[in-house]
Amino acid sequence: MAAVSIVTPVYNAASYLEKTVELVEAQTFSDWELLLVDDHSTDGSGALMERLAKKDGRIRLLETVPGQKGAASARNTGTRQAKGRYLAFLDADDVWRADKLERELDFLRRQDAAFVFTSYEFGDEEAAGTGKVVHAPRSLSYRQALSRTVIFTSTVMFDLTKIDRTLLYMPDIKSEDTAAWWRILREGYTAQGLDENLVIYRRPKKSLSSNKFAALSRIWNLYRLQEKLSVPASVWYFCLWAPRAVLRRL
């Protein structure tokens, strides 16, 4: 049984997937299983996944439940099937540094933590780093997380002996990952941050204004509908969060 289970949702990711898998295979920590979860792809990703799995027995192929679709469903499918003690997420178009697993796992063990995350860097369409790094704070509580969404999905790692995997299931809403982190922290866990840039977040070419306004709307709805915060509390956290989030996207 592998020590680390890596869950990667795959939706029309044929352009990125082979490179992503190669970067996982190049990790300095090699005791892992990679769960590629096909989310009803239509671009040939399924055939590519099968070819990659035949070349490396550590790769397992899964599919989202019929009738369900989206990153949350794909990640939940992988989380349910994970066999490792530790769980990590990696989106199909993001990039891990070669020592990401080794450095983060060592940090998690030293901290005796259930939930850790790392710093990350924004990348361009080719996943080349832009130099804009989001630094992980030393720790993050629920209240702190409400005002600073610095936890990026491809940076997290969990110890499944310290946290029930059902708590990691993501809701079928926009910004499902942020909603999941908040729920975990609300349950009393503290996320421990490793301030090392180990991940590149690939950003496709999109309108900056579109990205900004979509992010503002998603977070406001999380405050009001998911966390059920009062209007004054939502405004307070929103005013703390919005300037940081917009600046990160410029």
Image: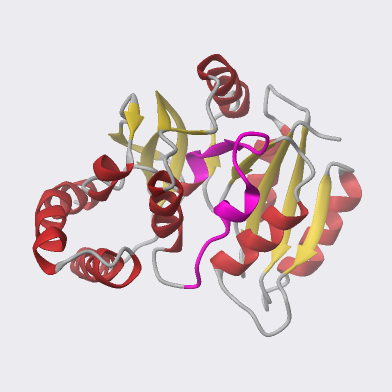
Q: Residue at x 31, y 63 (%)?
A: 227
For this rendering, which residue is in front, 117 or 54?
A: 117
**Viewer can see residue 218:** yes
Q: Which image quarter: residue 159?
A: top right
Q: Residue at x 63, y 61 (%)?
A: 76
* Residue 239 magenta-highlighted: no
Q: Is residue 96 left or right of residue 186?
A: right
Residue 45: horizontal and vertical position, in percent? 71, 67
**Viewer can see residue 52:** no
Question: Taking 111 as reference, is 154 above or below it?
Answer: below
Q: Is residue 232 left or right of residue 185?
A: left
Residue 174: horizontal and vertical position, in percent? 40, 70
Q: Which image quarter: residue 242?
A: bottom left
Query: What span is colored magenta in the figure?
Result: 154-172
For this rendering, which residue is in front, 182 or 16?
A: 182
In the picture as drawn, the residue positioned furthest to the top comes out as 110
For this rendering, which residue is in front, 158 or 204?
A: 158
Q: Which image quarter: residue 183?
A: bottom left
Q: Is residue 177 left or right of residue 149?
A: right
Question: Taking 83 as reference, is 63 above or below it?
Answer: below
Q: Residue at x 28, y 67 (%)?
A: 228
Residue 208: horizontal and vertical position, in percent? 22, 63
